[in-house]
Every structure is written in C-alpha cells, then in structure tokens.
Amino acid sequence: MSPRPPVGHPTDPTDPGDPEPDPEPEPDPEPAREVSIAEIQGTGSASPLVGQTVTTEGVVTAVYATGGLNGYVIQTGGTGGALSFDTHEGSTAVFVYSRDTAGQVAIGDSVQITGEVSEYYGSTQITVPADGLTKLDQALPVVEPVTLDAFPTDETQRESLEHMLYLPGAGDFTVTDVYNTNRYGEVGLAIGDQPLRQAGDVMRPGAEATEYYDAQADKLVLLDDGKTTDFSRNPEQPMSWLTVEEPVRVGAAATFTEPVVVAYSFDQWRLNTTTPWESSGTDGVDFENTRRATPDEVGGDLQVATFNVLNYFTTLGEDIPGCTPYTNMDGEGTNVRGGCLPRGAWDETSFERQESKIVEAISSTDAEVVGLMEIENSARLGETPDEATATLVAALNERDGEGTWAYIPTAPAYEAQGTDGGQDAITNAIIYKPAEVRPVGDAQILVGDPAFDNAREPIGQVFVPITEGADGETVEGEPFFFVVNHFKSKGSADAEDANLPEDPVQGNARTSRLQQAEALSTWAAATAAELGVEDILLGGDFNAYTQEEPLQLFYDQGYTNLGEQFDPEGWSYSFGGMVGSLDHVIANASATERITGATDWSINGPESVMTQYSRYRNNTVNIYEQGVFGSSDHNPLIVGLDAGFPVVEEPTDPEQPGTPGDDDEPGDDDKPGKPGDNDKPGKGSDRPGNNPGKAPDHAGKPGKPDHAGKPGKPDHAGKPGKPDHAGKPGKPDHAGKPGVGARGDVTGAADGSLAVTGTEAGGMLAALGVLLASGAGVLGLRHRLSRD
C-alpha cells in the first residue's frame, strides 16, 4: 500500500504516489551444526538441541521403509558391546524420520544426515528431507550390539539406551502378555525368567501389595514388530508373531538370536525388530514351547477338577431375536456381541468349534468329578433345565464311550427351594463318571442368600468313591462334599464398595466377594454337617487371587489352598500383563489329609485369544486349531484325592495267622501314611523342571486310637488300617463316622447301629485275624458281620 498523504493537501491526480520499498532480503540460513549423536541425545529425557538443524553421521542399524515408521536408526560407529552403567552416560543412536530417504539405505550403511532435531512423544528424532542424506565413501567402524547383565528398570538408564542396538542374553526376558499381540504386534516381556505376578497372588492386600503392584510396570518391556499396523482394522495383513508353527505363550522364555533396537513410544519402552516383522523363521526371536498336551500327574484314587467353559451356550445367537454377533474377516458371525441373554456361539458351526475343544480338554483332565463355570443356565433362558449340561455330557460320552459321564441335575434342588433356576444367564454345574463315584442325594444349592444377588449360586454334591471288590461287589470309599462356585467378577463397579478407597490389587466388588466367601463358608459347613459328611472341597472361579481377602477368610477357618500347596508356580489366569490364580480348590482340614497333589494345567491362560473359537478367521493368519489349547481363557485345576477305600489284605499262611495290624497299628504315629509313587511324586508346576508335587514320604491321615476302622455303612464292617497308613486321628470314645446309606440317608453311629466301642473293636480285630487265616479276607468279614 502507498503512504497516505497528509490531510488537507490535495494530490496531483496524475501522480501515482511513491513506489513501495523493496522487501528486506531473508537472512541466509544458519549453517547446520555438525555434532555427534551423543550431543544430540544428551543425558536427559529430551535432547538439548530440539529445534536446531544439525549434521551428524553414523552406521544404519535398523530400517523401516515399510510398516508405517517411515525411517531408520543410525548409531555412532564403533560403539556398543558390553556396557556398564557405571561409566555409560548417554545414547549414541538416534531415529531418523524420513519418508524420502528410508528406502535408500540398508543396514550396515555409513551415512551422514542433516535435519531438524525434535522430540516425538518422548522419542528423540531427526527429520531429514530428501536432500539431507549422504552415503559416506569411507565406512565407519562397525557397531556392536549392547550387552547387559540385565535390562534396567531405572528410567535414566533406559533413556541412555534409546535407539541403541541391543542383544538380550539367555534368560533375560519371559513372555508375560499376549493380549494385544494380535492387534498391534506387541508381545509383553517381563525382565527375568518369570512372568509378572499379580500382587494379590503374592501377598495380602495393603500398602506393601499396592507398592508391589505399581512396581510391576517397571519390569515390563514390549517386543514390537517394527510396524504401526492395527491388525484388527487390517485383517488381510498377516498379524505379527502369532503362528501355528511357533506358539507365543505367557510364561515362555524369549531367546534372541538377532539384536533389537531399544525404543520408546506410546508411553512404553520397546524392543523393536531391526526391520518390520515378516515371519517366525526370520524374526530373530525363539519362543520356548511350553505347551503340554496332558496334565501333570496328581496321584490319588480319583481326581477332582474345575473347568471354566467360556460361556458354553446351546442356545445360539442367530436363533434369538435381538441378538447381534461379532463377525470375522469374512463377515461371518462367531459369537454373541449383545442384545440378548445368550453369550456363547453365534451359529452351529461356531458352536461345534467351541464344543470340540472343551470336550477334548475335559476328557484329557482324566478327572472323575468336574465343576463347571460359565455354562448356560438353560432354565433362565426358558429352556429345559440343565439342557446345556446334558448336551455337553452327551458330547463327552460320544468321545469317551456311552455312559462314561453323567451330570448332577439341579432342577429338583431348585424346585425344593421354590424357584425354577438361578438368576443369571450362566450358572455352575457338576459332571462326573458314574463308574468311579456315586452321588448321594440331590444337589445342594445356596439359594436366596443376598450375598449372591450379583453372582452365581454355589452348587454342591456329596460323592462317594466306588470301585469293584474282589468278589465283584461294589466297594465304597469315604464321602466328600464338593461345591462349585463363581464369585462376582472384578470387571464392574459395585455399590458395596461405594465408600471404600480404590484398591488396584483387589479391584472392583471386593466387598461382594468377601460377603460371598462368608456366606459360602457358613453354608458349606452347615450343609456338610447336616449330611453327615466331614470332608469339604470348595472349587471354582473365586475371582480373587490367592492372598486376597475372600481366600484369607477360608484360610483362617482351616482351609488349605491346594493349588498354592502343591503347585506354587502354577496360575490360572492372565490379565493386564500379570498372571495369578482366580480359580481354586480349597479343602477343609480333614479333606486336605486326603489330597495327593494338584496342578494348574496351562492350556488356556497362556494362549492368545486368537486360539479360541470366537476368533476364528479374525485375521488372514488363522491360529484356531482343534485340540485343548484355547478351549477357554482360564486354566483347569486338577486335584488328586485318596478315595478312602478299605484295603484288602492278602491271606496269610495258615501256619502263621498273625493279627492284621500287628505291623501297622492304627494310630501309630511313627508309621508313615500312604507313600507317594517315587516315579510320580505328584503334580506340581506346569513349568518343565519345577514339579515339586507331593513328597514321597507324605504321611496321610494319622489313625484313630482304639478304632478298628470306619463303621456305619450298611453291610460294611468298617475300614481296617492300610499298610503303612496310620489313618485319621482318633476322637476319644468315638465309634467312627456315621455311614452314608445307599439313598443318602445317614445311618450308623448316629443311632447306635453298627457303632463299636474300643472293646468291641478289639474283638473285631481278633475275628478278622481268624477269618484271614482261613482265607476269608476282609470282604468275608464284612459279610459275616452284616449278617449278624
């Protein structure tokens, strides 16, 4: 614009006015400052040269021309190797962001670059234009990967490694999280040789546990695929790391055969592959194969297990108006997303994929009694009560043989309490092998207790172990009361906790779970006493880790956590990059004496969700397979149990009849109990080489003084002592435990029938000696006493 003339002075109409002055010329840009990479990085969390244009040189150690990172990494020649933080101060590597030049370099090139320094979400980088790259004619000294005694947890030390080439050593990292692997190509690694453990699985809640919980984040490092791809939005692109050839599982050791680059992005420290991930055969990382097709041995005459069946619904989503599905990359429904009560498979094809895995896994536990969680509550859905449980049993029998499995009906127990079924769409259930155990009476269900208004009611059943005697007659063991449970989850807030401070260790609804534990403990004890049963096993998904308040309540009452006792390294569930046991079998004091071992069978918790039926064809790489792995998201827990069968002694030489029990008198505390099998001492950790199991010299139950055995069963003379087995401690003036009749009625010592005093016991032992001498055996004595 021309200058405006002063007011009151007319202008010459022909005068164009004064011309505009020429603009000031732009100053010449400052020449790029030549600096080392160490000067660019500095020793703090951010570069001291941010905003400056610099020139530096280095050796290319990683290239990301594809995959979305659009750059490469250079490191000062001759640096790296064995590193000590006592002398090491700052990084000698930097990320070069350059779409224009990333495709022009290769690993090993010596280059000079010019560009502007910046911090991109906490990561130091240099942005290089198309003309900012020069390849050097003279090669720089070779870069060696950094080696460390252990990857640091200190933030300053990590910062001093940013973008440097690093080769972890054996045992440096263990897989601790695979939940987001199928989406972002990230594998969570824990520093050291164990996955990160939930604080509530290690110690009681409180300030120390909260501190432990918070510290776990410092031990996590992400193994990254060198890409920015979200595979859930791009399922046609093969997801990284997850393959059928090399399963990547929580708890597996990660062994590095090629170096990686230490990087920081999205608020996480990472180990980036030096090129975008392509295949398990070329990624430079070997993952330990921790899969075990069968569980460890737990010993015992029979096994009891818990199994979460991952919302096993026979009512399919496609058949219910309002239901909406999750779909795979082909647009096919896989499982129910919402809009209706069912929570399981969308159609028959998906249901068959789900059921086949569950059936093989339950069958392979070799358990005789199995408590199920997350199975359809058919009555709640308006179907025939227990229809889903019956369907699962039919599928098991198709695999294992007709009549191998049966289930405990729940309808009679609900009807007896004036209701037609549980309040939730999922419920608990119990299945069993009728050739191995006999249920006594109907199911026992805790109905109407307000503590379980937001959870599934406990369902219990008394079982008696059975076997065939030498004469073909059925021989019975000691009864036990097994209750399957599913407490309120941690997933949603609860009004009961409204006035409590947040607890990251126990999570949501901790008050509800504690109330449920109190109600269960009271009910189980009272029910068992009413039924005349001493031994109690409480199993299932307590949604509380091993040391949390609900479990502590049981410990204070004399219960033992069998998983913790026999498989301390085991765990059942993985969440938030940490592992722990939400699933437990706990035993009261008398039942604990019968336990021979326990194991968490790690077939589900360590697996990627992509192994489950509901993720079938969610990516062009499909890792759903037939078999037990990924049959649920919780590991089954298996417990070995001494059945308590009477022991039949071999007939003695008539010339030397002897007296049964001379060698091992009941109640002799010096005599060991049932020894463990030296070749199979019992189940322990699923981790190879760490299987403590049950000690071979386990003493079992000490015996009852002046007690000839366990009278009280109709037509049963009592349980003579086992060789080298002292039995249960005796109660003064106690004739034995009342027996359980054939129809569940309590008989025996409660009304004096078949009860024995100490004097009568002595007479019975003498009679037993005579009969054994004549070859009659224990069963012969049983028959004679019953006829008398």
Image (cartoon, rainbow, N blue to C red):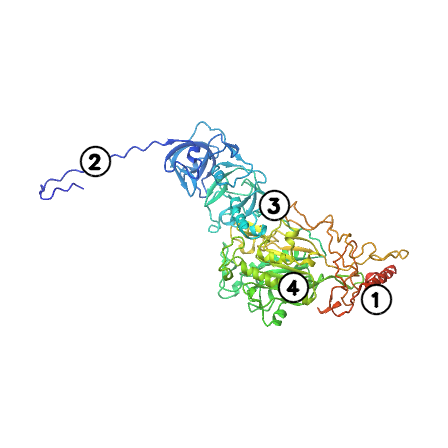
Reading the image, the residue beneath label 1 is: 784
Reading the image, the residue beneath label 4 is: 525
Q: Are marks 2 and 1 in contact (CB under 8 Å)?
A: no
Reply above or below: 238 against 84.
below
Q: Amino acid at mark 3?
A: Asn
| CA neighbours of label 4 inside 10 A, class few (<14), some (14 to 19), many (20+) | some
Mark sitting earlier along the chain (2/1) = 2
Q: Are marks 4 and 2 in contact (CB under 8 Å)?
A: no
Tag 1, which secondary structure? helix
- In this rendering, would 501 be left or right of 459? left
- Tell me how far mark 3 sits from mark 2, CA to CA: 75 Å
In front of the other: label 4 or label 3?
Answer: 4
Q: Quadrant of the N terminus?
A: top left
Q: Quadrant of the C terminus?
A: bottom right
In front of the other: label 1 or label 4?
Answer: 4
Q: Is residue 274 visible?
A: no
Q: Amino acid at mark 1?
A: Arg
- Tell me how far mark 1 sits from mark 3, CA to CA: 58 Å
Numbered circle sitting on residue 289: 3
Mark sitting earlier along the chain (4/3) = 3
Reply above or below: 428 against 681.
below
- In this rendering, would 500 be left or right of 411? left
In front of the other: label 1 or label 3?
Answer: 1
Mark sitting earlier along the chain (3/2) = 2
Reading the image, the residue beneath label 2 is: 22
The residue closer to the viewer here, 504 or 152, is 504
- Tell me how far mark 4 sits from mark 2, CA to CA: 99 Å
Tally of numbered discs: 4
Mark sitting earlier along the chain (1/3) = 3
